Image: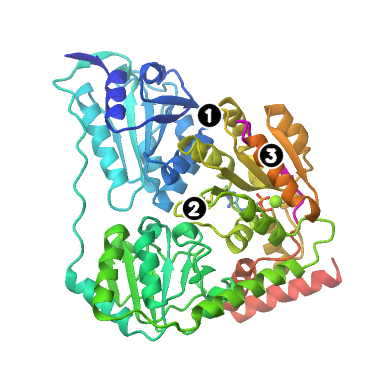
Amino acid sequence: MKKSGAALVRFALEQLGIRRTFGIPGVHTTEIYDELNRSETITPTLVAHECGGAFMADAASRTGAEIGTLLIVPAAGVTHAASGIGEAGIDGIPMLIISGGIHSASGHRYQLHEMDQHTLLKPITKGTWRVTSHRDIIPTLYRAYEIATTGEPGPVFVEVPYNISNFLGDVDDMPSWQPPQAPPLPDQAMIEAAAQALAVARRPGIFAGWGAVDAQEALIELAEHLDAPVSTTLQGLSAFPGNHPLHTGMGMGHYAVPAATNAFAQLDCLLAIGTRFSEIPTGSYGITPPANLIHVDINPEVFSANYPARHTLEGDARAIVPALLAAVKAIKADASDTGIRAQIARDKAAYRKEWRDHDSGDRVNPELFFSQLRQILDDDAIVVADDGNHTFLTAELMPILGARNYMSPSDFNAMGYCVPGIIGAKLANPDRQVVGIVGDGALLMTGMELVTAVRERLGVVLFVFNDGELSQISQAQQIPYNQKTCSVLGAVDYEAFARAFGVAYVALSGNGDITDSVKLALEKAGGGVPVLVDVRIDYSKPTRFTKGVVKTNLGRMAGRDKVRVVGRALWRKVRP
Ligand SMILES: Cc1ncc(C[n+]2csc(CCOP(=O)(O)OP(=O)(O)O)c2C)c(N)n1
Ligand SMILES: [Mg+2]
């Protein structure tokens, strides 16, 4: 039979259960857009910039039932989207990216949007394909999808040349999609050995990353059975409920929140699930996990990459954690109350008090903001942060109560995630509250996507932490340089900015306004309109994370560099 490539793309996406694509059409993709527009199950969604589209697709993947999909023009669309693809690639988030491609048989060179996209995308995707015939389209999209969603998930890229998508060609059949089999569990003997190590440990602890988000029920039971404290990575903040008595907060070691630092101080066994021990979750490698380290991950390359593991269990945490729980229960009775819960509660209360007692002057105290926001929001609200000081404030002060209810850029660390992120999350979860915490610098990168939020009538609330600086960097410049080079922003009238897009505006100027302003914003958002809340945040107290990382990095410097850096700072203090 004869089909256009565009019709074949539509068929494959419908089979894969894709319900939405993000992107901007161009001459290479208008035929595919036209097909999708006629699909009863797929909605092609226009974005303002492909980078925003990629962050939306990422957020839809993190919080929704199906994987985020991009439909973009070749070359310029792909380079614009690359930051979002990179974030998904490093963070293990599945994403399907389809671009048009130049006419593959025209015989001409220097065509519009001509570029080797595959070389560019190789390091940030799990695979890239260029279809070479109509017969190729359906199997290639199925294969790409399977690779994106199995093993450690990640982005995949398929280029469909213009002459294939837009013209008719021969296909023999249109096969339906068959989902792949679940992978096998690791050897039972390895699970039992790890369970034995946990069962005999005097002070076991659990460190949960994004890879653990879908194993929460068994993880809670395992932690309770062992009376083991649980800390999370930044990306995995939602892997364990923030209001559980064994939840310590983010990290371990001296950069972590105090409840985590103290609870993890004397561990003799650590169970790490779905984390790579990369730079952010280790506070720039400032932790010392015990030698008795059990590492569970779907990607075996992470084992012993930064810290040697005694036991490694390769596979999906959704299968391994319940198996580990069963094996532990078979060896060890429920642990008695070790006193760890009371210690965590005391440390958490003291840390909150330390923040509340910090004098924020006439600006908004971060602890008061987050504790009141938490009280007002629904338990299943989705919280999206960007990258900056506001991220670590959110991580340290905002309890996240359910799996996949928090996201922010992590190891790839691409600023600009939040505004598109709340859009992607809300489109995937129209009945849940979705709020963003964004730095003013990050807002300037992708804030134009508010036009998309308004067009889609999304009742999202965006809290802009307005401090006029790229604070995470300006803070880091303080000690070594005592100067804020290129980290002070221009002044922006956010009320006018919001008005330009038809976004509602709420001012949050001081501590007395917090509850009323948050409630007002949520009420306005209930009407299907995005709301920008201009938060005059107080950034005068640094987070534990920032202080810890600065200390770790200074401590690691060679003596002569330390003298140079500290000496320069002192000199500039006297002679600015
Ligand atoms: C694309 C990109 N560019 C630069 C950086 C470096 N960076 C990390 S945090 C940060 C500051 C963010 O400023 P803002 O959004 O205002 O948040 P704040 O730290 O003030 O809360 C910068 C510039 C980055 N992570 N990503
Ligand atoms: Mg800022």
Is ligand 1 less than 8 Å from the beta carbon at label 1? no
Report if residue 223 is visible in the image. Answer: yes
Q: Is 393 positioned to the left or the right of 240 in the image?
A: right
Dividing the picture into quarters, in which one does residue 299 lie?
bottom left
Which residue, given by chain and number where applicable, does mark 1 sit on? 47
Which residue, given by chain and number where applicable, does mark 3 sit on? 532
Q: Is 123 positioned to the left or the right of 509 in the image?
A: left
Residue type (three-letter) at the residue carrying disc 2: Phe
What segment is highlighted magenta in the picture? Answer: 526-537
Residue type (three-letter) at the residue carrying disc 1: Val
* Residue 140, placed above or below residue 295: above
- At x 48% / y 72%, what residue is drawn? 246
* Residue 149, placed above or below residue 338: above
- Magenta segment includes 411: no
Crowd around label 2: few <14 · some 14–19 · many ≥20 (10 Å): some
Question: x and y percent of residue 184 in the render?
Answer: 18, 57
Dividing the picture into quarters, in which one does residue 276 lie?
bottom left
* Residue 523, placed above or below residue 469: above
Count numbered badges in the picture. Answer: 3
State the separation of the CA atoms marked 2 and 3. Answer: 26 Å
Question: x and y percent of residue 66 in the render?
Answer: 36, 38
Please identify the quadrant where the C terminus is shown.
bottom right
Is ligand 1 less than 8 Å from the beta carbon at label 3? no
Which secondary structure, mark 2?
A: loop
State the separation of the CA atoms marked 1 and 2. Answer: 22 Å
Which secondary structure, mark 1?
A: loop
| Of the pair 356 and 565, the residue shown nearer to us | 356
Marks 2 & 3, CB-CB < 8 Å contact? no
Residue type (three-letter) at the residue carrying disc 3: Leu
| Of the pair 202 and 28, the residue shown nearer to us | 202
Which residue, given by chain and number where applicable, does mark 2 sit on? 412
